[in-house]
Image (cartoon, rainbow, N blue to C red):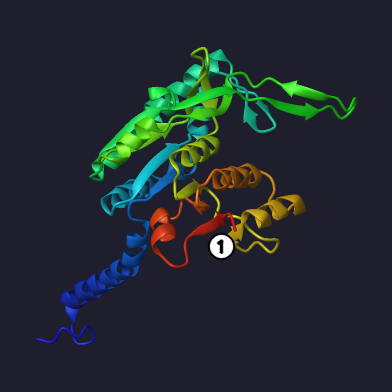
Amino acid sequence: MSDDPKTITGDRGADYAEGLAKAGVLAEALPFMREHNGETMVVKYGGHAMGDEKVAAQFASDIVLLKQVGINPIVVHGGGPQIGAMLDRLKIQSSFIDGLRVTDAATVEIVEMVLCGSINKQIVTAINRAGGFAVGMSGKDGNLIKARKLRRSKKDPGSNIEKILDLGFVGEPSEVNPHILDTFEESDIIPVIAPIGVGPNGETFNINADTAAGAVAGAVGATRLLMLTDVPGVLDDTGRLIKEMTVERAKTLIQAGTISGGMIPKVETCLEAVEQGVEAAVIVDGRVPHAVLLELFTPAGAGTLIRAR
């Protein structure tokens, strides 16, 4: 019997065609797998991107695949929507300054509970169910992320005086100790990190997940920082996706107002990571099935890649 797909009919023909398509995909991905073998990839998994159960399961299987083909993935996750939902359930009122949640002593306990508890363990469980060996941790474990209080100022429009904003227990990384992550790299362990840092006096600090991921990527010398979010990437003035840009062009687009709003801090995190030695940072729509694989193993990629030059 001929194995020409044009002459095969019925269920066997459909199965053959599907298998042929999968084989073609694997063949196309192989050069990229070789290229990235042995590299470290930090993947920031956003609170909005993890909302769909099916996409979340696909994300977990994709992370396992990265590990199995010789890539060292490190997952840093957020959880803003889930934190908000829990605070609402507990009837704890939140306040925001310039889009940043003011985190008092009561709130930071809830933040730590949600990030290090339910969300972190959900991701760990999903990766383990997909055949991986994930271990959950926070920036407190092994003094991974030492933090300081985040300082922000705002100019009073009336007096033109800079006013220091107190955001409570909101922090930023002051030092990332990659020792424990270096140990994981030599094993089959996939670290899943909640963005909670420890202060100089043992305080708990809530750190923006994008910022934490960028700091971790720089500290471990990652080849890629993948920022999974709920937008396709950086768009130009006509609404079209910008597939690749240099640091210089990104700064120009921020100054011109093309990059605006919530995209600015994401791009700035990418710029900081690249300036710390990360080869490239990518903003990717995490709601797209297999977004990580599309970005790493296909010629076209899946988001906006930012590199030094």
- Percent of width and height locating residue 2: 13, 87
Q: Is residue 56 above or below residue 216?
A: below
Q: Which residue is rendered at x = 77% and y = 28% of the image?
A: 154
Taking the image as shown, residue 175 lies to the left or right of residue 265, namely left
Count of labels in the image: 1
Question: On the rendered image, what quadrant is the N terminus found in?
Answer: bottom left
Q: Which residue is rendered at x = 18% and y = 83% of the image?
A: 8
Q: Nearer the viewer, residue 205 or 233?
A: 205
Q: Residues within 10 Å of mark 1 (few under 14, many from 20)?
A: some
Question: On the rendered image, what quadrant is the C terminus found in?
Answer: bottom right
Q: Which residue is rendered at x = 40% and y = 26% of the image?
A: 116
Q: Is residue 252 above or below residue 204?
A: below
Q: Nearer the viewer, residue 57 or 174?
A: 174
Residue type for callout 1: Lys
Taking the image as shown, residue 301 lies to the left or right of residue 233, namely left
Which residue position holds label 1? Answer: 243
Q: Is residue 226 above or below residue 143?
A: below
Task: Examine the image and state in which quarter residue 17 appears.
Answer: bottom left
